Each structure stands twice: as structure tokens, then as C-alpha cells.
Image (cartoon, helix red, strand yellow):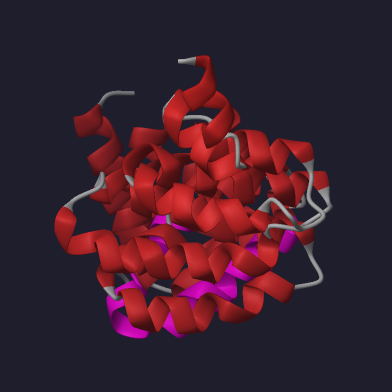
Amino acid sequence: MNTQETRELAARIDAVVRRGQAEEAYALLAPVLAERTPFRLLDIIGRAVGSGPLAPVNDLLQHISSRRTEGGWVVIGSALGQRLDRDAASALARCRTYAVIADIWYGADILGERVPGPALLSDFDHALRLLSGWREDGNRWVRRMVGVAVHFWAKRTRGAAPHIAEAHALLAFLEPLFDEWEMDAVKGVGWGLKTLGRHYPELMVDWLSPQLHRRHRALMRRKALTYLSEEQRARATGRADEVREAE
């Protein structure tokens, strides 16, 4: 299936959804989800569907989530992403629900890059407030999505000067999660720290140094240090004097 064919299918599904026929809409979508359809094509379908009225779209998303296919989370994530400018709180709440239903790492990552990540880009302060409770959520996949969202934000802002204050705020936001112990969540938070360190390395050095005195997973530390230079790593870990002596 090519891009044009995908757009045509997306329009058909959207029309059926708008008529309140969620089961019929899913029947059109199911063959696509049964194949290894590229995510970029599934995103086209999700965006088209997500632009429709909330109630019938919710019915379709419920059908998709009950099958728990990998591609289904892409469609759901892109559909919810279309709601961020209309009702970010609802979109994020549903994203959390679907991540719990998915109950697998790729579900959390797919949703995290399509809902909370873009939410941080579109309305940073509002999104940060809405996501604050996710850090203490009892579900590890929800906590993982916090890190995935930060990774997405850092990947898109790429260290640009206008975003430095926000990067600083995100590091402070992630601080309570540095001692996360559940490995599935650690990997997501570490991913966020890794990408922040790539694009905002000096901020990472200053932030990381005091964190390393806390109980933490070795993987969290490795992820945060990944893109720092040897000199930056030395400063972050308190080995700067050793490096200078070696020189």
C-alpha cells in the first residue's frame, strides 16, 4: 500500500467512523493492522481518524485497543495527537489508559512519541502540569512514557537556545525518577536523559553530578552519560581532577 492508497483508505475509514459505525470502520482497518504496514502510513490513518467527532472516534479506538496489535497503537497515538489542541487533558488521560492496556514496551514508546511528546512541544507548561502525576503512577509503562516524551521533545528541539530554559525544567521534572528501580521504566527515563544529554550536554553535567549520590540503577547513569565528552563525564562524576592529572 502506497501513500495515496493509504490516504484514500483513511478517508473511507473516517467517513464510516463519522456515521457512528465503529465496527465497520475497524473491519476496513483490520487487514492493514494484520500486515507489517510502515508506521508512517499508519500515522496517516490515525491523523485522519483523529480529526473527527470525539465520541465515534473513541468507539473505534476502543475496538483497536482490544486487539492489542502493534500497528494499532500507532493509529491510536496519532488519533489522540490530533486532540491536543482541542483537549490535551483528555488526550493524555486516554493515552495513559491505552498504555496500561498495551502492557508492553513498544506500546508505551509508540504512544509516548505521539501524545505526551508532542504535547510538550505544543504547550510546554500545560503539558508539564498534566504529566506531573505520571511520575508517581503505579504503572511502570506510564512512568516510562514520561522519559519517552522528554526524548521526543529533546530530539525535536535539538539544543536550540530558545529551549534551554525548558530543558532545564525537564531535568528538574525528571529528578524524582532518577532513582526509579523498575527496569522497564528505567529504560524510558534513561532514554529521555540520554537525548537531553546529547543536545543539552552542559545542562546535563550540572544536573547529573548531585544525582549520582543517590541510589540509582547503573543503566540510568550510563544512559545519562552516553553523549557526554570524556571531560564532561569527568565533571559529572567528580573525576575532573583525575583527568587533569592524567593530562
Q: Is residue 125 visible?
A: yes
Q: What are the residue bounds of the magenta stretch?
A: 76-101
Q: Is residue 23 visible?
A: no
Q: Position of residue 35 (x, y in %)?
A: 55, 25
Query: Relative to residue 15, is residue 245 drawn left or right?
Result: right
Q: Nearer the viewer, residue 119 or 235?
A: 235
Q: Position of residue 167 (x, y in %)?
A: 36, 61
Q: Position of residue 123 (x, y in %)?
A: 29, 76
- Eyeballing the image, is 157 above or below 173? above
Q: Residue at x 58, y 52 (%)?
A: 209
Quarter holding the N terminus is: top left
- Eyeballing the image, is 111 above or below 172? above
Majority secondary structure in the magenta region: helix
Quarter holding the C terminus is: top left
Picture mark count: 0
In the image, farthest residue toward the front: 245
Q: Is residue 94 magenta?
A: yes
Q: Nearer the viewer, residue 181 or 90?
A: 181
